[in-house]
Image: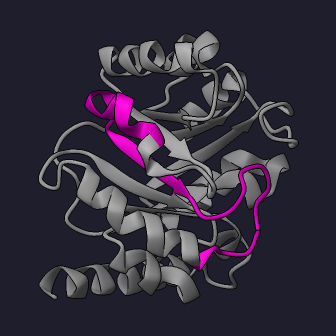
Amino acid sequence: MTGRRPAGVLIAASILDSDLGALGDEIRRAEAAGADRIHLDVMDGHFVPNLTFGWKTIESLRRVTALPFDAHLMISEPGRWTEQFLDAGCDSITFHVEVAAPQVGPALARIREAGRSAGLSVKPGTPLAALDAYRDLLDIVLVMTVEPGFGGQSFRGDVAKAKLAAARAWLDPGGASEVQVDGGGRAENAEVIGRGGTDVIVAGSALYRAADMAAEVERIRTLAATARADAGRA
């Protein structure tokens, strides 16, 4: 996933709100609907109160699609398990800057060493300044506009307005770095997200609960891309 960042806005389908008993079919459904990536929310019941799945599940799902796997590790010890998620076939791995600091730099470096994209996520209450020490190791900044742990939460528009454009300006504007947003990735929030210069929108319940997933993917993408282009011309 390294290389120049996309000109448009990409949609990463989060399987957290899919039918977890039929994950293979749900991933195929997202691919057929035009999603650009599959977003994998890994939770350990410790860093966040929820518990989902681990690298063994991801490894099993890797054969289902050629779409990039975008892993979001909401776990306390990402540095301990980096190798397993790389081996499972994740194309990008993002974890939280709020974890114990000594593991952050080495884990990011190992992800990049493996030729994958390395990212850090910030909770709504965490300032972007928390990322400063790792700037040279980052391909992705993932801005959380909800508290991590559960899907379907209400979008924090104040966080989006405060952080998205700031994150875009903080990163190399012409390089491969991406600003992603996770939380409230749906059509009614797409313009605010797009105006912030966002590259990737994580969408879960908006897609998997839609009557027409393909139409919803295109709707979110178009609204965000138009707003991003308009903001760039302003």
Q: Position of residue 19 (x, y in %)?
A: 80, 57
Above/below status of 91 relative to 79: below
- Tell me if 198 is positioned left or right of 86 in this view: left
Q: Is residue 136 magenta?
A: yes
Colour scheme in use? one colour
Residue at screen point 53% across, 49% down: 38
Residue at screen point 85% across, 48% down: 21
Residue at screen point 68% across, 56% down: 26
* Quarter of the figure with the N terminus: top left
Q: Position of residue 203 (x, y in %)?
A: 58, 66
Q: Position of residue 219 (x, y in %)?
A: 46, 85
Q: Nearer the viewer, residue 62 or 86?
A: 86
Q: Nearer the viewer, residue 144 or 29?
A: 144
- Tell me if 132 is positioned left or right of 34 in this view: left
The magenta region covers 130-157
* Quarter of the figure with the C terminus: bottom left
Above/below status of 99 relative to 34: above
Q: Nearer the viewer, residue 188 or 138?
A: 138
- Tell me if 232 is positioned left or right of 89 in this view: left
The answer to whether residue 34 of the structure is visible from this angle is no
Above/below status of 59 relative to 207: above
The answer to whether residue 178 of the structure is visible from this angle is yes
Above/below status of 195 relative to 27: below
Residue at screen point 51% across, 51% down: 127
Q: Is residue 7 magenta?
A: no
What is the total number of numbered labels drawn onto the structure image?
0
- Tell me if 176 is positioned left or right of 53 in this view: left
Q: Nearer the viewer, residue 58 or 136?
A: 136
Q: Position of residue 5 (x, y in %)?
A: 22, 52
